[in-house]
């Protein structure tokens, strides 16, 4: 039988130990902060009923959901007329389940199914992989992790202010010092379209202005023209696209620009409250920037919208989120307002790697390797290994009888900083040889002194 070369599906990745140690470092920092802010952990199945997933992400999203074939003879329900009606008809006949596309829809489904048992406002965080049948390219994968925190069951703007605090704390913990939290409000964007005489066209407006950073004002204007925005409307919009200034100056500009707009006034009130609450927390520098042209996820969000950009690197947003007023409406439980944030683990990893922000210890597995000379010293070493682990010190023993050079090479390649060499003399005296692999120095110490030394260098 010929053996084929193993491979993995396009758009997926293996993560070796070095990468996983660093990824876990990011996960642990974020998880700790989520918990500090009162968010509780939640996990949902990798697969959901297709009836739960379909119709929630638009036609493009429906196409990108990975469908799972029914068990057994999945094709038994198909007939010739199904083929004539196209792939959608066939899909419903052969597949009842699909892989999770995001964490938001499963969260909404969970809330509705468990509404009588949950305490509202309900705060949850979720760190799990999602799957999308997208065309893979750099920075876009078919399997990737999302890292979400949401609070539902309240429309209090303190929640938005807490998201600003949480982002600041996550960035601080990860060592990302240069970053900007861009904030805008869906109501302001709606009011702008009304003010320029294009009511109901906010989706077209925002799809265009969302590209402002990448393509510039002229090309945004060209795109708006293709969406039948009039010359008059574009001329009225230009002051918004070109306005520069401080947060306060932007507030003052919009107060004048949106005068007489009830929706605009409400949006400004909400934005003002978020800034005031954030200041009330006492944060000395909140990195918050009012961005008039921020327009992420417009069809989904109904209030505040956030996006986080890291400074000093050429990379897209590393976090984003916002307020939504009807998360659970599609499942028959309308009117449940919520706000959430999602951290992009892959992009955060790239930023930290480029800026060299991972702590050196995040590359370490074991802190000490025991290197015995023979079978007798190996048996002597086992209770010592047990003692080290009982003290919480990551430790391992070289399992085979091998030349000392081979054992030291193993420690060197695994970046284990200390080795404990045990020969017949060490066994007889109880004074063991501890070698510092970085400095090349070694000393004779008993096991208690070794434990104390390793604990001090934690």
Image: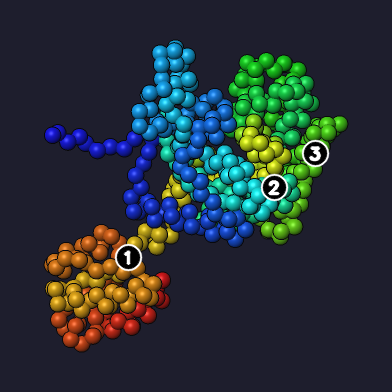
Name the residue rendered at 20%, 87% in the picture: 429
State the separation of the CA atoms marked 1 and 2.
Answer: 45 Å
Mark carried by residue 192: none
Q: Can you tell which of label 2 and label 3 is closer to the viewer?
A: 2
* Mark 2 vs 3, N-terminal side: 2
Mark 1 highlights which residue?
366
In this rendering, position of residue 74 left or right of residue 297: left
Height in image: 119 above or below 235?
A: below
Percent position (x, y) of residue 403?
13, 67
Residue depicted at 56% across the width and 51% down the height: 125
Q: Tag on residue 153?
A: 2
Residue marked by disc 3: 266
Residue 275 visible in the shown view: no
Question: Which of the 4 image quarters holds residue 302?
Answer: top right
Residue neighbourhood size for the residue with mark 2, other residues' Cα within 10 Å, grouped as few (<14), some (14–19), many (≥20)? some
Dot 3 falls on a residue whose secondary structure is helix
Q: Quadrant of residue 188?
A: top right
**Which residue: 34% across, 35% down?**
9
Q: Is residue 432 left or right of residue 157?
A: left
Please tell me whether mark 1 sits on a helix, a strand or a loop.
Answer: loop
Neighbour class for label 3 at 10 Å: few (<14), some, many (≥20)? some
Judge from the rendering whether residue 382 lies leftward or rightward of residue 289; answer left or right: left
Tag 1 near tag 3, CB within 8 Å: no
């Amino acid at each position: 039988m010929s053996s084929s070369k193993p491979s993995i599906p396009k758009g997926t990745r293996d993560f070796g130990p070095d990468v996983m140690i660093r990824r876990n470092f990011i996960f642990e920092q974020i998880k700790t902060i989520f918990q500090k802010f009162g968010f509780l952990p939640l996990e949902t199945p990798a697969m959901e009923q297709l009836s739960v997933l379909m119709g929630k992400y638009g036609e493009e999203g429906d196409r990108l959901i990975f469908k799972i074939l029914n068990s057994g003879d999945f094709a038994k329900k198909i007939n010739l007329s199904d083929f004539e009606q196209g792939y959608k008809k066939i899909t419903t006949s052969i597949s009842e389940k699909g892989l999770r596309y995001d964490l938001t829809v499963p969260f909404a489904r969970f809330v509705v199914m468990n509404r009588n048992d949950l305490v509202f406002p309900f705060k949850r965080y979720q760190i799990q992989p999602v799957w999308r049948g997208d065309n893979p390219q750099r920075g876009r994968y078919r399997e990737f992790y999302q890292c979400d925190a949401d609070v539902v069951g309240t429309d209090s703007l303190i929640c938005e202010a807490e998201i600003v605090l949480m982002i600041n704390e996550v960035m601080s913990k990860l060592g990302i010092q240069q970053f900007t939290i861009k904030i805008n409000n869906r109501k302001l964007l709606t009011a702008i379209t009304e003010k320029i005489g294009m009511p109901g066209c906010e989706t077209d407006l925002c799809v265009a202005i969302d590209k402002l950073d990448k393509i510039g004002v002229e090309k945004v204007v060209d795109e708006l023209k293709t969406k039948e925005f009039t010359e008059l409307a574009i001329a009225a919009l230009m002051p918004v696209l070109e306005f520069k200034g401080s947060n306060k100056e932007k507030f003052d500009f919009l107060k004048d620009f949106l005068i007489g707009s009830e929706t605009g006034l409400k949006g400004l009130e909400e934005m003002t409250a978020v800034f005031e609450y954030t200041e009330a927390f006492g944060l000395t520098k909140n990195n918050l920037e009012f961005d008039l042209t921020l327009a992420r996820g417009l069809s989904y969000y109904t209030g505040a919208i956030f996006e986080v950009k890291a400074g000093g690197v050429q990379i897209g947003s590393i976090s984003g989120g916002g307020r939504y007023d009807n998360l659970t409406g599609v499942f028959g439980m309308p009117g449940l307002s919520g706000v959430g944030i999602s951290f992009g683990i892959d992009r955060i990893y790239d930023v930290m790697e480029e800026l060299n922000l991972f702590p050196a210890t995040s590359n370490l597995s074991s802190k000490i390797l025991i290197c015995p000379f023979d079978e007798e010293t190996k048996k002597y070493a086992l209770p010592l290994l047990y003692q080290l682990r009982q003290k919480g010190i990551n430790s391992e023993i070289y399992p085979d009888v091998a030349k000392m050079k081979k054992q030291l090479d193993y420690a060197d390649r695994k970046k284990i900083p200390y080795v404990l060499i045990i020969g017949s003399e060490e066994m007889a005296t109880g004074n063991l040889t501890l070698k510092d692999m970085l400095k090349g120095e070694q000393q004779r110490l008993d096991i208690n002194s070794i434990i104390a030394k390793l604990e001090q260098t934690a």
